Image: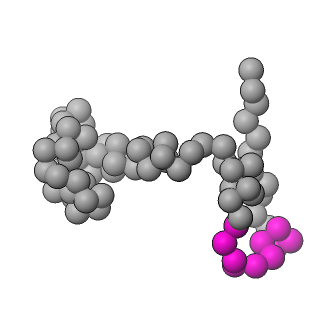
Amino acid sequence: MATHRQPPPLTRRTAISTTPVSRPWLYRHYPSSSHLLRADRPVDEAQAAGDARLICELFGLTFNVATRYTRPYQDLVL
């Protein structure tokens, strides 16, 4: 079983500059692909808001697609 290492903590010593990190550093510390991270964002927003129109505006989806994301969570959102 592969173990997942946590990224190093952000401290004054480790945060030397505000320049973007390199791709090798990013993939070494965060092994998930960007595709998987992007796929989870509409689902998380649907759970939090449950508003299909908001999902459309945030992610550029059609209303039918956004409705598929929000339908399972409509009863949970007040």
**Left or right: 44 as drawn, with respect to 2:** left
Q: Residue at x 66, y 43 (%)?
A: 31
Q: Residue at x 60, y 43 (%)?
A: 32
Is-magenta flag for residue 19?
A: yes
Which SS does the magenta portion mostly show? loop
Q: Position of residue 63 (x, y in %)?
A: 13, 50
Q: Position of residue 59 (x, y in %)?
A: 30, 58
Q: Report how many numbered discs are placed on residues in the image.
A: 0
Q: Position of residue 14 (x, y in %)?
A: 82, 68
Is-magenta flag for residue 24?
A: no
Residue toward you, 72 or 75: 72
Q: Most extreme residue toward the right, as rendered? A: 13
Q: Most extreme residue toward the top, as rendered? A: 1
Instruction: Kindly indicate the quadrant of the structure image that contains residue 65.
Output: top left
- In the image, residue 44 above or below residue 23: above
**Left or right: 76 as drawn, with respect to 28:** left
Q: Residue at x 29, y 46 (%)?
A: 46
Q: Which residues are magenta?
A: 12-21
Question: Which part of the image, by quadrant, shows the C terminus?
Answer: top left
Q: Is residue 77 visible?
A: no
- In the image, residue 51 above or below residue 77: below
Residue toward you, 77 or 44: 44
Q: Is residue 37 visible?
A: yes
In the rendered view, how is the structure colored? one colour
Instruction: Kindly indicate the quadrant of the structure image that contains residue 74.
Output: top left
Question: Which part of the image, by quadrant, shows the N terminus?
Answer: top right
Q: Position of residue 41 (x, y in %)?
A: 40, 49
Q: Residue at x 17, y 52 (%)?
A: 62
- In the image, residue 76 above or below residue 50: above
